[in-house]
Image (spheres, rainbow, N blue to C red):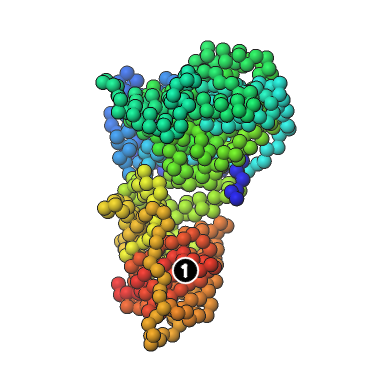
Amino acid sequence: MSEPILRQVLTLAPLPSAPPPPANALDGRLVLVLGGTPALRASIDAAVGRLGGRACGWQAEQGRPDVPGPVDAIVDAGVLGSTDVTAGSWREPMARTVAALRYVYDDWSREASADRLHYLAVTGMGGTMGLAAADGAQPLSGLWAGLAKTLPREFPACDVRVCDLGPTADPGAALLAEMLGTRLLEVGVGDGQRQTILPRKAAVDGAPIRLADTDVVLLTGGGRGIGFEIALDLAQRFGCRVMVSGRTALPDAHLPWLTCSDAEFDEENRLAFQRRQPGESLQQVRRGVRGRRQAREIWRNLRRAREAGADVTYHVCDVSDPNEVADLVAKAGDALTYVIHNAGIDAPARLPAKSTDQFLAVIDVKVDGFLHLLSAIGDRPLKMLCAVGSLTGRYGGMVGQLDYASANEGLARLAMWAGQRLPYPVKSLSWPTWDGLGLITNLDAAARYMTPIPVSEGVDAWRAELTRHGHGEIGFMGEIGEVSPQHLRGIVVPSDWSGRSRLLTMRFLLGELVRYAPPGELRTEHQLDTGWASCLNDTMVDDTPVLPVSLAVEYLVAAAAWLTPPGAEQLDVHCLADVRVDPGRLRALDGHLTLRREARGGWHGDAWQVQVGLSTVGDEDEAFAAEATVLFGVGRPTPPAPPQPADEGVEAGPPVRAAVGYRWSPYLTDVGPWDRTPAGWTADVAAAPTDWFTVLEPPQARLPLAHLEALVAVSPEDGDRQWRVDRLWLAEGGVPDRVTRSVDGRVVGVSDPDGRTLVLLEGAAWHAS
């Protein structure tokens, strides 16, 4: 049984003042300043100059900055400078942003250094990110927040921030302090306060709203996907009339492709490419196939509604056209009590592959569609206005979703702004992917970012929101999967998220980003101290604390996860090959250890491999400490069979600790008595991973560290300085219980209470350096 959907609301959390950046933080850097009032731009320009940089503006006619040279940072005030909250008022400033991003694209997309590029989106909702009403708030500035959060998908090494600006004496200094000196992805400053958004788990607790059979519900974008599922549910459950709309005109019901079987429909679409007319492009054929598929889905959905006796009617309406929206609202009549804005389009493609008009059209449907509805509704006494968005706005989108994330964050802030002004409830619902429904083009790819939610649970959660009072943005969380390093470092991870431990572990093992160019390169730096990394005091070389061998291997595994190739959603780590760890090079001198890690990914034939190395940094030099080749594969790995029974006549006593320079505190390798088996030996391990770090929430390693350390301790000796493994297989996820060892000690493993192999090591032994 799956866990219930986590429902979250947004609250504000106070923050200390941001530390000022170093005085030379922008030495030699060119900072492009976009949008804003003349006073704001002047303040930013002055702050850039004080930090050693040069500020420049944008020449729209020439399509380039007004100062020559490569741009190193963009401070984008977007639509600020205007209090106009009307349809289309965002288009010119957003087109300027898109043009600027196109200008820097080649340079920024190739850049790997993590300390050069910055993009700061400046929003204007009073310093509260829209969670509280503010005079002169500009909700359309939220468009740039969604864009900023998704920008690392286009520019992996770009450091991004969102700063919501309220009344501030020196806004330029405040903005650059956030861009250069802090970690949080989204912060509000104003009136002497600094705060961030803290998501909080909360049940639906508003006063009930009665949805009656006399009500009319208007649902834009409700002919297909998740919109139709809630439309059908409401009509069946409450007997109300539900009007759904879409841009697709329904064809004549007698067309064969509309009523044929799925197999026949697929064949018809295949033949469409063969019958392509002279001058007809493949794109036009694909567009025709897509249109037929959408019309067929709507036609089938309406048939479902008729067969269920549900009053669901379909109306053609382009929500980006104010006249069509006004006509649609008028058709609903005086009984209209619910308006749900669910319309949206998503055409994921990297920025160079889409035109500016295509980019703006995605925003148009979400944002201008909502504004057109507000205008058409007028002073009607609704029971609720509901804006339907996506978590791509709150947490950033997938590759190719700059426009979609921008649209959804803009819609969410617009709905918050409207809710502070209207006499009835206004909610914004931010959804993850629904399993098999919605605008997601590639469900497998989407599932990498967040676990899709079941359709039935989504409908139940949506219905609960529509029948309870409330305001603001409500998010529904699956478990977060793939994130960018910028998001991992910058988002607040609430204590009640089910995936909190995993995210905090990923953050810990990521360390400080130095270079990042996926899927080919990752460089990071890590600082450990005996004051909180207590495991450093429990392993020694020559009486000096060292990093445990098992934890060094964990750092190697963790690096590879950041270099999974695009389009290979099913790949996972299968094993580590040619593992070498030299614990004598992992010493914590004076109680401190600095690690540098470098990983490089690439195809070797049909296999994806990542070469990972760890080195330590001393006073004068950098020394090799550990390395491995991480091998990826599809599905569960298939390790070799466990050790077979030993040949008769081979006798050996139970495993003993290796007589090497690497020494352990007793509890680290505290195993129960070794029991003889036909294949070798087995023992229980008393694992206490929380003792490795004296922090509130210690990292939860992928490897069974205590069990692996016990196996390191009894590895055969061909030397005494370097621990090596031919193959380390990661076979299953589970709770580690026992360790096993072949008679000759060359094959060892970790199993769960049911005897399933979790980790298997071949050729584990100590060698001379």
Question: Can residue 471 be seen in this snapshot?
Answer: no
Depth check: 210 or 116 in front? 210
Q: Is residue 185 left or right of residue 306?
A: left
Q: How many labels sit on residues? A: 1
Q: Secondary structure at mark 1?
A: strand
Instruction: Please give the name of the residue rendered at 33% of the width and 67% of the height, measured from the top-left corner.
Output: 726
Q: Is residue 539 left or right of residue 58?
A: right
In the rendered image, residue 422, in percent from the top left (x then y), is placed at: 65, 22
Instruction: Please give the name of the residue rendered at 44% of the width and 24% of the height, measured from the top-left corner.
Output: 256
Mark 1, residue position: 750
Quadrant holding the C terminus: bottom left
Instruction: Please give the name of the residue rendered at 52% of the width and 18% of the height, measured from the top-left corner.
Output: 316
Question: Can residue 512 be seen in this snapshot?
Answer: yes
Depth check: 707 or 723 in front? 707
In the rendered image, residue 126, in percent from the top left (x then y), is placed at: 57, 29
Kindly identify the amino acid type of the residue bearing the numbered disc 1. Val
In the rendered image, residue 271, in percent from the top left (x then y), is placed at: 34, 29
Depth check: 449 or 245 in front? 245
Dot 1: within a 10 Å radius of its alpha carbon, few (fewer than 14), some, or many (20 or more) residues? many
Rendering quarter of residue 13: top right
The relative height of residue 396 versus residue 693 in the rendered view (above or below) is above
In the rendered image, residue 374, in percent from the top left (x then y), is placed at: 59, 18
Instruction: Please give the name of the residue rendered at 56% of the width and 34% of the height, measured from the top-left corner.
Output: 430
Rendering quarter of residue 133: top right
The relative height of residue 604 versus residue 129 in the rendered view (above or below) is below
